[in-house]
Image (tube, rainbow, N blue to C red):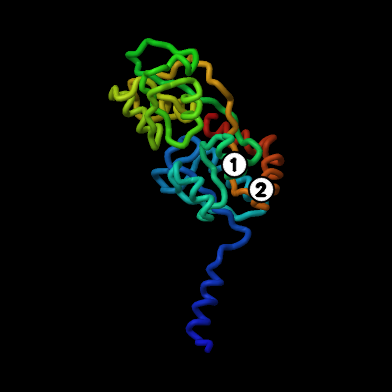
Amino acid sequence: MWFPLAGALLAGCRRRERDPLSVVIGSSPTGVPFSFVDPWSNELTGSMVDAATAVARDAGFRPETAITPFSALIPSLLANKIDVIAAAMLRTPERERVVSFSNPIYHYAGALVVSKDNRRSFATLSEIGSLRVGAQVGSRFIDQLHAAGARNVATYESLVDILRDLENGRIAVAYGDEPILRYQLRVGTKRNVRIIEGFRPPALEELCLVMRKRDPRLDRVNAAIERLSAAAIPAINRKWGL
């Protein structure tokens, strides 16, 4: 038997289904200048958020944003809670097995940070050895440290936590995203730490938008990136000091 109230509820559910042209962009709140929460507006902002929004609009989609912890980005994508990851998430073979990466938005490498009182320099990651080094959980930089033979790696949720423990002497070295570290040391709270300028990172990594495997929208996203790569995306990167 069909009840009018049940029919109304089902119709309401259908009306609340997601617009097929909308895309939910998930970004972490701690990746300045790539993605972070503006303390004045309480909204996501940053270079990757701006780029993803511009790409989505150029591709004919209506973008929305969702604040998502870095370690929850891929699980949220696979659970269909978000449609695009726009954060400091580098392309890795392990990630490529479960998600798809767009054409690159930006390229960058890692940086080593030590306390200002520490006069030691490191040319490569292999020199870290048994020193306690901090890196962000789920990041490409943990893989690089292990590949270089680092034997005492501590993982953290954010680079802010890593720098705090570096200042407090709980770790000897910090390793992470060079643009984020330089931005935080340039505009954030003054810290008793320094970036090692003579360090040679093992690789220049690709920063891309991330989507689900076999998402048919990826082709439209890549076409939009190609159209915007000459002027709009470089302008966004320059705006954020990249």
Residue 195 image position (x, y, % from top left): 43, 19
Q: Quadrant of residue 30?
A: top left
Q: CA separation, marks 1 and 2?
A: 16 Å
| Relative side of 138 to 220, left or right | left
At 47% from the left edge and 16% from the top edge, which residue is drawn? 126
221 versus 200 height, above or below: below
At 50% from the left edge and 39% from the top edge, which residue is drawn? 46
The number of numbered badges drawn on the structure is 2
Tell me the element at label 1. loop
Q: Which residue corresponds to mark 2?
A: 218
Q: Which residue corresponds to mark 1?
A: 97
Q: Nearer the viewer, residue 240 or 8?
A: 8
- Mark number for residue 127? none
Label whose residue precedes the other's in the sequence (1 or 2): 1
Question: In this view of the protein, can residue 158 be seen by the observer?
Answer: yes
Residue 111 image position (x, y, % from top left): 47, 22
Amino acid type indicated by mark 1: Arg
At 47% from the left edge and 24% from the top edge, which residue is drawn? 145
Q: How crowded is mark 2: few (under 14 residues within 10 Å), some or many (20 or more)?
A: many
Question: In this view of the protein, can residue 179 be seen by the observer?
Answer: no
- State the residue lying farthest toward the bottom: 1
Amino acid type indicated by mark 2: Leu
Q: Which of 54 and 156 is in front in this view?
A: 156
Residue 241 image position (x, y, % from top left): 53, 29
